[in-house]
Image (spheres, rainbow, N blue to C red):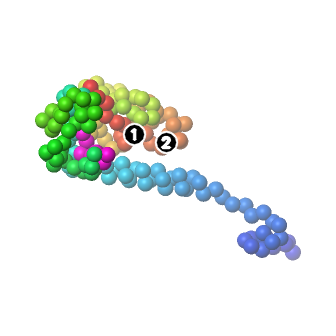
Amino acid sequence: MPPKKRTGASARKAGVRKTTTRKAPARKAAVKKTAVKKAAARKTTTRKGGKAGQRYKCKYCNYVYSPQIGEPQNGIPAGTAFDDLPDDYVCPICGMQGKGKIGTWGFEPWNPTRYVCKVCGYIYDQARGEPQHGIRAGTPFEKLPDSYVCPVCGLDKKISREYGKVGKPQFIALMG
């Protein structure tokens, strides 16, 4: 009759090593899922917001006020629409550079047309589109399908293994 395998505390007392499986990949997957959920929540608030999600750019220094981010350092919480800014609001860049008190009157609505991938630096240009991937010229970034993947690093297996799917949440707006 073969000897019984020992597990748990009795195995440790007997000096038998218990084999374990690594749980790090499961934890890593949970962290990725949470990041994806947060990115989806940010995306829906921007789309739902309409005018509230509209960004504004200072005509003098190109500072961009985003209602989604707000200015916590100046006491303006995230989610504060541009129209709801206080009357004494001053552009944080122009005010610091001594250009004067540029208030809300010095801002204009801004809609970015170029986005850069934070992972590899690829630039999606609305005017150019991606005809080789079926995206016509003039397609705004917001209208890209949710399944959109960066055409450069999204196809690299090493990057995908490290960062996961490199899609729309990994892109940020470019000035100009």
Q: Please, what secondary structure does the residue beneath circle 1 have?
A: helix
Dominant secondary structure of the residues highlighted in magenta in the image: loop
Task: Establish if 38 lies above or below 56.
Answer: below
Residue 2 falls left or right of residue 79: right
Residue that mark 2 sits on = 163
Residue 81 falls left or right of residue 160: left
Residue 171 appears at what percent x and percent y? 36, 37
Residue range corresponding to the magenta coloring: 65-73
Q: Nearer the viewer, residue 14 or 102?
A: 102
Task: Establish if 35 lies above or below 126.
Answer: below
Q: Is residue 71 magenta?
A: yes
Res 150 → quadrant: top left
In the drawing, what numbered circle is on residue 145?
none
Residue 169 appears at what percent x and percent y? 37, 42
Task: Establish if 80 lies above or below 149.
Answer: below
Residue that mark 1 sits on = 170
Residue flagged by tag 2: what amino acid is it? Tyr
